Image (cartoon, grey):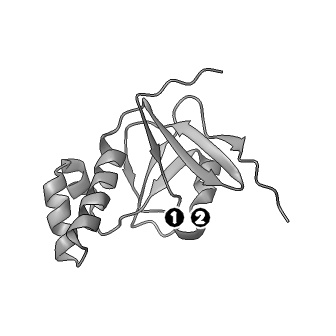
Amino acid sequence: MKVSAKTVRYIKLGAGGRWENSLDRDELHFGYGSVSHELALEGNRERIIAHLVALGRSPQAASRDAQEVADFYALDETCLWITIARDHLWWTFAEPEVTWVKTDPGRAGERFRKRSAGGATPTSTGRRSK
């Protein structure tokens, strides 16, 4: 199987893997709840950075965080998303639409993208359980 991607991004599924169950729903969950959906949709990295610095993040951390938020919203369905979960490397492509769910306590993460064709596919990492 040949996989072709314009860009590749690693996505962490929450602290301690708490959003790993999103893989079972064909969703990629993403945090940064301190950045509203509206601010992220604007795509203005400088405004996101200023917002995060005002909340106490260092300029360097705010810049990195803003880039991650901007990428999650702006990258299209040709981006290959990868993560490590359940002792496997998972990869998928995702629909470009971002859904905000922070106000729904039954959902993981603050926002998500649905997987597109190809699905979340586990690949063995070669790690062995003890």
Q: Name the outermost residue toward the right.
A: 130
Q: Amino acid at mark 2?
A: Gly
Relative to 87, is 71 on the left or the right? left
Task: Measuring from the top left, give residue 107's x and y in whole percent.
Answer: 51, 62
Crowdedness near tag 2: few (<14), some (14–19) or many (≥20) residues, C-alpha within 10 Å: few
Q: Residues within 10 Å of mark 1 (few under 14, many from 20)?
A: some
Q: Quadrant of the N terminus?
A: top right
SS for callout 1: loop
In the rendered structure, the answer to whether residue 112 lies left or right of residue 35 reads right
How far apart are labels 2 and 1 at the CA level?
5 Å
Q: Is residue 61 above or below residue 127?
A: below
Relative horizontal placement of residue 70, taking residue 76 as reference (left or right): left
- Location of mark 2 (residue): 17
Going 62% across and 44% down the picture, which residue do you hit?
90
Residue drawn at x 19%, y 72% as measured from the top left: 53
Question: What is the x, y in percent for residue 52?
Answer: 22, 69
Q: Quadrant of the C terminus?
A: bottom right
Under circle 2, the secondary element is helix
Tag 1: residue type? Answer: Gly
Residue 14's tag is 1
Across and down, in percent, residue 93 comes to: 50, 35
Q: Nearer the viewer, residue 50 or 115?
A: 50
Q: Is residue 7 left or right of residue 13?
A: left
The number of discs equals 2
Residue toward you, 74 or 27: 74
> Farthest residue in the top direction?
2
Question: In the displayed structure, would residue 77 be above or below residue 31?
Answer: above
Identify the residue at image location x=30%, y=59%: 64
- Seen at 61% across and 58% down, the residue is 20
Residue 92, image quadrant: top right
